[in-house]
Amino acid sequence: MSIVVRVALISGSEAEIEVAPACSIDELRREAQRRLGVGRGKLLSPSGRYFPDGDITVAQAELSHGDLLSLHREPLRLASTVHAFAAILGDGTVVTWGHDAHGGSSTAVRPELKHVKQVQATGSAFAALLADGSVLAWGNPECGGDCSSVQERLVNVKRIEAGFHAFVAILDTGSVVTWGDAAFGGQCSEVHEQLQGVQQVSCTGYAFAAILDNGSVVTWGHPAHGGDSRAAQHLLKNVQQIKGTMSSFAAVLDDGSVIQWGPPAYGAKAVQVPVENVQRLEAGFHEFVAILQDASLVTWGHDPWADGITVLPFKNVQHVQVTDTAFAALLTDGTVASWGDADSGGDSDAVQEQLHDVRCLESSGGAFAALLEDGAVVTWGDRQRGGNSSSVQAQLKNTRAIYANGYAFAAIVQNGPVESVVTWGNAFYGGDSTYVQAQLSL
């Protein structure tokens, strides 16, 4: 004998669904999604608890006629390696697309990818933090796609950070677990005892730097690319932020000054960069960019004393994004200024008239995308890396967020309660999301 249950969204929308006792909870969830016109979500019992994993039936769940269930949906979130994307869906599962060998295929761990809280990415692998504090990894094993050697230690993980070749899991105790390429940060045994009370982790291309709760810094990884900070330790006090280029670190202290260390080619020395009142720091492949307290902008390279500091002619800067060889700054009036390699987005003249009321910027390895306040998107830079979105422009309305990997962009578009993913750029490396579109509504 069938029963009728009610399923409601947090918005208040509700649907009455007639189900047989033998009907599975998963089938009920899919029917609720169809009736309510939404994508994937988690079905909660009348008591507000998630139903257990497995294909249990309505009878086994002890549902009664008239019960009110909730369909809970987290906002769609994305992460990316250089060549692939991973999407955390509304029910906490994950779908991937792009180059299989670089994280685009998660087949090996797919059955276990449930209740996912966070996904992080190295250059070629993904790691997912689950609700129970455990971790799953997939993709290129040499870049962290295999965490089996440290799996037993990956418990009570608070969050995951990533470099280009390795992962760092920060535990709820403030200690860390690392895996991936040992030479480039996947192994931290020499400094493991010092890694207590970790608050933030940053990386160059080949090394990591951790800010501890006392404001000091611990580094590991390739010594020639920032992993050796011995020359800087006497200066690294009360550190607030660290950023890394491919081979140098720069740290912002609480007084707004900056300390830099890195390549032996520049003497393996630590220097106090001749800038003051730094509010926020960003880093490209080879240059640092600092937004100062007065919202002006300065930039410098690996040797700030020999090469000097460049004061850029931009004021009222909110945020800076970087491609491999170009920069773009979002100004407080909602306009954008760009500089650097024109082919990689350093020249935005062709779209400058469209760049107004910009909400945020995103960058691939060679192109920029600007999300406007009205939900439209403007792109420029290398066409092969997402600099031309004309093929999907009609779909880029009501855009909520933009993500990028090295070669493609992915936009989350919101039409009422329905979220969809629109992609462009190199199809082989994530610019084609045909597969994920089908998964959004299962």
Image (cartoon, helix red, strand yellow):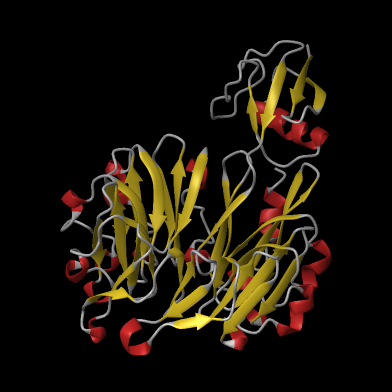
- Looking at the image, which residue is at 61% across and 20% down? 48
| Residue toward you, 145 or 129 | 129
**Whole-percent x and y of residue 224?**
24, 77
- Describe residue 193's horizontal placement relative to residue 203 as left or right: left
Residue 197 appears at what percent x and percent y?
A: 27, 44
- Quarter where residue 353 is shown: bottom right
Tell me what residue is drawn at x 55 percent, y 69 percent: 320
Q: Quadrant of the N terminus?
A: top right
Q: Nearer the viewer, residue 361 or 103?
A: 361
- Horizontal placement of 173 versus 319: left or right? left
Q: Which residue is at the front of the view, 228 or 35?
A: 228
Q: Is residue 408 visible?
A: no
Q: Is residue 55 at all visible to an observer of this figure?
A: yes
Which of the two residues, 164 or 277, is positioned nearer the viewer here? 277
* Residue drawn at 64 percent across, 44 percent down: 75
Image location (x, y in percent) of residue 205: 37, 71
Residue 152 is drawn in which quadrant? top left
Instruction: Give the side of residue 153 with respect to residue 15, left or right.
Output: left
Q: Position of residue 397 (x, y in %)?
A: 80, 59
Residue at 51% across, 42% down: 116
